[in-house]
Image (cartoon, rainbow, N blue to C red):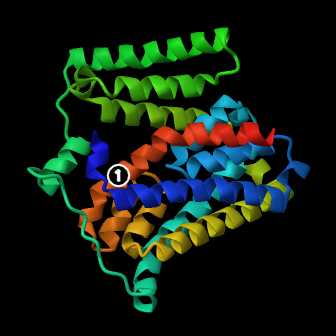
Amino acid sequence: KDLKFAGLPMLTMFTIGAIATVIATLAGYFIVSPQNHMDNAPAIAGMFTGTYTGGSANLNAVALHYSLQKDGNTYAAVNAVDNILTAFWIFMTILLPPILQKIFPRAKKIASHPEGHTEEEIRNLVISIKEEMTIADVSLLLALGFGSMFISSLANNYVPAIPSILVLTTLAIILAQFQFVQKLKGSSLIGMVLVLLFLAVIGAYCDIGALLQSGEVAGSLLLWDVILILIHGILIFGIGGLLKQDWDIISVASNACIGGSTTAPVCAASLDRQDLQVSGIIAGSIGLASGSYLGIMVAEFLK
């Protein structure tokens, strides 16, 4: 139901951006031919697709499915390249709109809010910044989380063709639709703590010294990622321009694809478009929910 707060222009451009990411990943794969330098190139393609459809959480989810985190050197190289190009594109999404607006002027489309809701009310509905938790809330959230993990693992044992991470993601999306789950306090905080713990474990596999010695692999990944980001940018800004969309909306949508729901509102604020902050958060959240599906789909296609 939060989709109504995003607005059709933002959702349209985000969808175009996600499709552009898939096309760009495949184009980079066939141009660079990383499969000639590394055995797990299809899985890496899935990681790139996931991370550029809603943020690095998808990269880690795809890596976990293909056990790529156990190859610490490659995993470190993928993360290093991803961090470099993500930072570059976040900067570009702030730099490009004013330049394009001067060359190709567009009417600023101020995002409207559903009747009866102010900007602050919508922000509180979409994302809870301050939450007062109870032991009952925490217990139920943990039970739902670990229960979903158990069910996804069990489903994968009976149907190995279905990745457990996709079962887990699907269960999370379904549970999030229930009113009693939405009313539980503390989900944001618990989720953040568990993500940080997950990243700490993943980071233990990374051997930075070995990364510096893997020049050919790192070089191939960097070239692939540069091509990916450039094609994504050309497609989303090119198609958005042809559709006469507001450059700021295009930029925030692209930022939501590449950086996720955490960087999109920052981009909107930097462009002095506070009206697009909530839209950016929702677009990034959609990417977070769908990126793992797209990532695994691309990886399986390239196998």
Residue 33 falls in which quadrant of the image?
bottom right
Where is the N terminus found, in terms of image quarters? top left
Residue 294 vertical placement versus 6 (above, below):
above
Q: Position of residue 45 (x, y in %)?
A: 71, 47
Question: Quick check: 9 above or below 243?
Answer: above
Residue 247 visible at all: yes
Q: Please give left or right for residue 225 compared with residue 57 in the image.
A: right
At x 28% / y 70%, what residue is drawn?
A: 273
Residue 152 place in picture, x, y as percent: 55, 17
Point out the residue furthest to the bottom here: 103
Q: How many marks?
A: 1
Residue that extends furthest to the right in the rendered view of this protein: 36
Which residue corresponds to the image point at 43% horizontal and 58% vertical from the top-left? Answer: 12
Residue 146: quarter of image: top left
Q: Is residue 256 visible?
A: no
Frontmost residue, 123 versus 70? 123
Q: Secondary structure at mark 1?
A: helix
Question: Which image quarter is the C terminus in?
Answer: top right
Residue situated furthest left in the rendering: 116
Identify the amino acid type marked 1: Ile
| Residue 103 place in picture, x, y as percent | 45, 91
Residue behind mark 1:
281
Is 273 on the left or on the right of 166, as rendered? left
Measured as percent of width and height from the top left, residue 77 is found at: 71, 51
The residue at the point 52 percent across, 72 percent down is 237
**Residue at screen point 69% across, 50% down:** 78
The crowding category of the residue bearing disc 1, from other C-alpha atoms within 10 Å (few below 14, some 14 to 19, many at least 20), is: many
194 vs 22, nearest the viewer: 22
Vertically, is 176 above or below 13? Answer: above
Residue 145 image-quadrant placement: top left
Residue nearest the observer in this picture, 254 or 136: 254
